[in-house]
Image (spheres, helix red, strand yellow):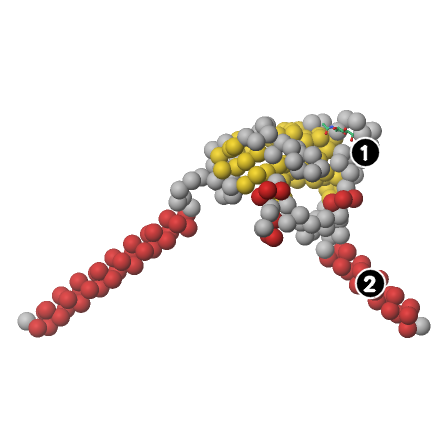
Amino acid sequence: MESYLLAAVSLATLTFAYTCYGGVLFSTLPQTLAVSASPTDGQVLKAGEDNITITWGLNQSFPDGTDSSYNKVKLLLCYGPTSQEDRGWRKTVDNLSKDKTCQLTIAHRTYMRNTQNITWMIERDVPTAVYFVRAYAYNSSGNEVAYGQTTDAKKSRNLFKVQAISGRHSSLDIASVCFSAFALLSVVGFMVLEKRGRSSAEN
Ligand SMILES: *[C@@H]1O[C@H](CO)[C@@H](O)[C@H](O)[C@H]1NC(C)=O
């Protein structure tokens, strides 16, 4: 009796864990999408300036109907292995709900039978790193059901580099410079006022 209860509880816990963490393992997904991107192997692109064109669709070597459950497609910019080394926050995990390989979403699209493409300007806040592009197909429940990527399984070929804009450019830097200038002016202003106040009191 007790063992039944234990089994039921374990099953419930497992089910809960499965649904909570998504439970979709990358290794179980078929690579049925053919994905290509305009950058050549090793090309260096500038964030905030350069565009990439991405093309995706069902790999024609799979039979009709392979994509019958595909509802949406998400295109992502993913870190290449050299940009993941010693960076736990970019780690590859088979469980897709914990995977940190692909953190930058390029676009969401409704899945179409025919080949689609998009031209995307690399956003200014994309960090300097080595990347590839991956597409996931989702079913109507929002779970990953297939993928495709511009690199091979080992992520060794067809990687490109994004160079972040050099120099101090972020709005945060500008804000901190403005704030420092404001603080300095306030102090000077306060000293001037105080001095004037004191000298007028002395007179
Ligand atoms: C399509 O799939 C076949 C078989 O898996 C593979 O050999 C081929 O490279 C794929 N083509 C593209 C464009 O991804």
Apparent side of residue 134 relative to residue 179 in the rendered image (left or right)? right
Q: Are marks 1 and 2 in contact (CB under 8 Å)?
A: no
Q: Which element carries disc 2, helix, strand or loop?
A: helix
* Residue 174 location (% of width, % of height): 37, 48
Q: Residue visible at 84% across and 67% down?
A: 9
Q: Which residue is mark 2?
A: 12
Q: Which element carries disc 1, helix, strand or loop?
A: loop
Q: Is residue 109 visible?
A: no
Out of 184 and 83, give the one closest to the viewer. Answer: 83
* Residue 36 location (% of width, % of height): 65, 29
Q: Identify whether 177 is placed above or below 34.
A: below
Apparent side of residue 84 relative to residue 62 in the rendered image (left or right)? left
> How many callouts does the rendering have?
2
Residue 14 occupies quadrant: bottom right
| Amino acid type indicated by mark 2 | Ala
Quarter placement of the C terminus? bottom left
Separation (CA) of disc 1 from disc 2 = 32 Å
- Label annotation for residue 47: none
Which quadrant of the picture is home to ligand 1?
A: top right
Furthest residue to the left?
203
* Residue 147 location (% of width, % of height): 72, 38
Q: Residue visible at 44% across and 39% down?
A: 165
Q: Which residue is mark 1?
A: 66
Residue 73 occupies quadrant: top right
Quarter placement of the N terminus? bottom right
Out of 22 and 30, give the one closest to the viewer. Answer: 30
| Amino acid type indicated by mark 1 | Thr
Apparent side of residue 56 relative to residue 52 in the rendered image (left or right)? right
Q: Identify whether 151 is placed above or below 23.
A: above
